[in-house]
Image: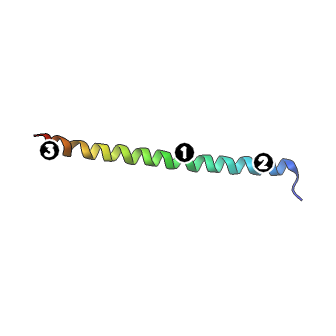
Amino acid sequence: MLSLEIIGVLGALFAFLIYGMVRTQLARRQAEAERKAEEGAPAAAQKAR
């Protein structure tokens, strides 16, 4: 049976893995939103003319 210390370390590593995955996904979504906003800005400027 695993000792409590090893279980704690494995739990902390798992939590860090999940944290990294969430941060990566949020950064990817933000970059995609910024890219769409930049692509949409020239099109909106042309429609205003």
Q: Secondary structure at mark 1?
A: helix
Q: Nearer the viewer, residue 19 or 49?
A: 49
Residue lying at 66% horizontally and 46% vertically, measured from the top left = 16
Of the numbered discs 2 and 1, the one sitting upstream in the chain is 2
**What residue does disc 3 label?**
47
Tell me which amino acid carries mark 3: Lys
**What residue does disc 2 label?**
9
The image quarter in which residue 47 lies = top left
The x, y position of residue 18, in whole percent, is 62, 50
In three-dimensional space, the C-alpha distance between marks 1 and 3, rounded to whole angstroms, equals 36 Å
Q: Secondary structure at mark 2?
A: helix
Callout 3 touching callout 2 (CB < 8 Å): no
Identify the mark at residue 11; answer none if there is no mark.
none
Coloured how? Answer: rainbow
Tell me which amino acid carries mark 2: Val
**What residue does disc 1 label?**
23
Tell me which amino acid carries mark 1: Arg
Q: Secondary structure at mark 3?
A: helix
Callout 2 touching callout 1 (CB < 8 Å): no
